[in-house]
Image: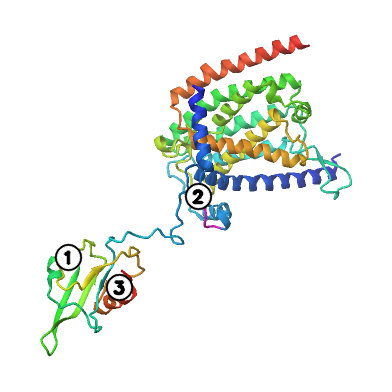
Amino acid sequence: MIDMNLVIFTLIKIVIVFACVMLCVAYLTWIERKVIGHIQIRVGPMYAGWHGLLQPIADGIKLFFKEDIMPTKASKVLFVLAPMISIVPALMSFAVIPFGDTTTLFGLLKEPVPMRITELNIAILYIFALAGLGSYGVVFGGWSANNKYALMGALRGAAQMVSYELALTLSILGVVMISGSLNLVQIVEGQKEVWNVVYQPVAFVLYLICGTAELNRTPFDMPEAESELVAGFHADYSSMKFAMFFMAEYANMITIASLATTLFLGGWQGPFLPPLVWFMIKVFILVYFFIWLRATYPRVRYDQLMKFGWKVLVPIALANIIVTGVVMQFIK
Amino acid sequence: MIKPLIKGLIVTLRYFFSKPVTVHYPEEKVGSFPKYRGLHIIGRKPDGSIKCVACGLCEAICPAKAIKIEIGELEDGMRYPKTYILDGWRCIYCGLCQQACPVNAIVLTPEYENARYTREELILDRDTLLKRSDEVKL
């Protein structure tokens, strides 16, 4: 028997989270343009609304009404499928991220409600599985367009994601060892006294580096590489298909930032302010950090990228796991 | 290896908090220098009639052939331009007409906003140029 109330309740939660995430994704583009503008001593968007606040909406409308171009020699099915494969896993990750402990919506509800869509025992595995799926979007998109630049972008994207996902997963193993759980809620509750970033500073730095690479953002934006590959895997995409790739990138950015918050920065926990506000503050500090990186560093060369991934990040991540294990053994 | 990376981040952070240098052009204007060569005027004599004596020197010297003059003559023998067409699109704003003019009639002003919606708006005739001399401050 399915509890209909539970189903409806979950659906409502999904809709709310989806709407909030899409809003964040839209305004992340505005934040990014503003931050990069100010770093380059410009002002960024100013004319659509107050300080360009309506710019994401204008962009959305523009992209929606653009002509949807399909290259004649493209592999039609994969060409249409690729943006979807990108965006669906990006949005699905938010199913397990705990935004706060419980809420009664200022006393509107009788019982406190947990502020997450679902609590999964293997939430970390789930998120990394989805992140792995997301890279198929890049690969399919680049291959199906039948364009050499796009194919190059896709190949680079595939290689980069395989190598950096390894280091990314290894980097959080230390956190998992300390908290003894793959459940994000338990990991957050385990950080009541001390945040994990104090125990695992190396892992945190590794996570941020690999996260940037996983997001395909500068300085690791190999698959896109405007100056060498035109736009890489999405060179032939237009209209909403392009917008989907774009939204997927920004949604992934929020995912990586929220996961870092949850794993290393104590999730929703913090004094005085409500849990959700603390969560948002931490996530946006990390998002700002990603944008800041993009505005600061040039793109790394492809061979340097691979060398850095395999010869530096993976050994450090492995060493971190070993050291964590040894220290834990001694403390026990 | 880490140190220069952090140095770079500090540089960008400092620029993030500095004031943008952007000038919001249509609302704010930086203006032009006094010697800027912009759109022309033709001056008036103290009695209000046109300074130009239709000698044709500006027409002759204009490298872009932007000036066309038709010569007229008053009863007392004074020459005046019957028509004086200055094509603001053809003109290269070199200022040679101003240098050639023996009576300082044609003068280039520092006005630099010469974008117009239609072609006709920048093909200036005698009366427009005269009227501009009343409107534009030098």
Q: Label 3's element?
A: helix
**Do the dots labelled 3 and 2 sit on one chain?**
no
| Residue A12 placement, left or right of A26 | right
Q: Residue B70, how many percent across, how many down?
A: 15, 79
Three-letter amino acid code at the position of disc 1: Gln
In the current view of this chain or complex, which residue is farthest to the bottom?
B75
Q: Quadrant of residue B43?
A: bottom left
* Contact (Cβ within 8 Å) of mark 1 with mark 2: no
Q: Is residue A181 above or below residue B58?
A: above
**Magenta span has A275?**
no
Callout 1 crowding tier (Cα within 10 Å): few <14, some 14–19, many ≥20: some
For marks 3 and 2, give the CA distance: 37 Å
Kindly identify which chain the residue marked by label 1 belongs to: B
- Give the foreground label among 1 and 2: 1
Query: Residue A63: in sight, yes or no?
Result: yes
Quadrant showing the C terminus of chain B: bottom left
Sequence order check: which comes first, mark 1 or mark 3? 1
Residue B99 tag number: 1
Q: Residue A41, how many percent across, how many down?
A: 47, 45
Residue found 61% across the figure and 15% down from its top: A318
Q: Is residue B74 above or below residue A324?
A: below
Q: Residue A56, how many percent across, how many down?
A: 57, 51
**Do the dots labelled 1 and 2 sit on one chain?**
no
Three-letter amino acid code at the position of disc 2: Val
In the current view of this chain or complex, which residue is farthest to the right?
A110
Residue A43 tag number: 2
Start and end of the magenta stretch?
A: A43-48
* Contact (Cβ within 8 Å) of mark 1 with mark 3: no
Residue found 68% across the figure and 48% down from its top: A19
- Give the foreground label among 3 and 2: 2
Q: Residue A133, how many percent across, how many down?
A: 60, 32
**Do the dots labelled 1 and 3 sit on one chain?**
yes
